[in-house]
Image: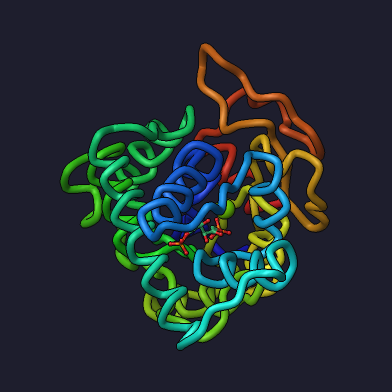
Amino acid sequence: MTDLAALLFDVDGTLADTERDGHRPAFNRAFADAGLDWDWSPELYGELLAVTGGKERIRYYLERYNTAFRYEGDLDAFIAGLHSSKTEHYTRMLAEGAIPLRPGVRRLITEARAAGMRLAVATTTTPANVTALLRHALHPESETWFEVIAAGDVVPAKKPDPCIYRYAMERMGLLPAQCMAFEDSHNGILASRGAGLKTIVAVNGYTAADDFDGAAIVLDHWGEPDRPFTVLNGDADGYRYLSLDMVRDLHDR
Ligand code: XBP
Ligand code: MG
């Protein structure tokens, strides 16, 4: 049995519930700033989440939902401009404290650090978004707690492609058997499982009906001592909130 050495965290939906009231309104503000009348409702956004990555999501919207839109010029540059404006809006919202961590995240990370567990992030979101979330929702210095922050365009393909997880493990000199991944979505677990990682899932409003085939366990949230999780699939072996002991147990099964 290989000992657990590192925890690899997804960000959006996993560390914090960022999509509905974070990324989505930030996209809408960027569209309004550009004089566009596009409005991504919570329902439409749920469909657009089929595609990870903000620039990719805007392109998918144009290809599937707004086919009448015509842009005379460089569409890639136009999308990149919209996306960088969205990132500004989103990181400002985080700096204002608009998005808290999910229950249990701070407790688990604190416990993992105290136990000498190595930590990393593997996400499709833009690096500035990760930094802003960690600084403002976790701790001003918490970027330094993570040995690798693998994010956004650092790899050629976003989740469900496994390369962001492979990249993080390569940088840390770790094998999949030494790690546990934490995810919230179908695309996320395709990426983590594709990289050979055991994966613990906590769903959110957008992903509750996703397929999590191959998950070590599926929870409704990470849980706290005074706010136990509900197991949606798998066996928690008596645990009521996600502790490092529970992570180790799931890893060693
Ligand atoms: C997260 C995403 C991200 C965000 C937007 O997926 O899909 O694209 O919605 O981030 P995961 P950017 O949690 O599976 O990594 O706009 O910065 O791309
Ligand atoms: Mg996610």
Task: Say left or right for 42 vs 230.
Answer: left
Reply above or below: 163 against 215: below
Task: Say left or right for 112 vs 167.
Answer: left
The residue closer to the viewer here, 119 or 96, is 96
Reply above or below: 35 against 248: below
What scheme was used to colour the molecule? rainbow
Task: Say left or right for 167 vs 112.
Answer: right
The residue located at (51%, 34%) in the rendering is 243
The residue located at (46%, 88%) in the rendering is 74
The residue closer to the viewer here, 24 or 203, is 24
The residue sitting at the top extreme is: 226
Number of numbered discs present?
0
Give coordinates of residue 76: x percent, y percent.
48, 83
Give coordinates of residue 121: x percent, y percent.
42, 60
Give coordinates of residue 106: x percent, y percent.
37, 34
Quadrant that contains the N terminus: bottom right
Give coordinates of residue 62: x percent, y percent.
64, 69
Reply above or below: 84 against 236: below
Reply above or below: 239 against 182: above
The residue closer to the viewer here, 36 or 236, is 36
The residue located at (45%, 56%) in the rendering is 31
The residue closer to the viewer here, 30 or 89, is 30
The residue located at (67%, 35%) in the rendering is 205
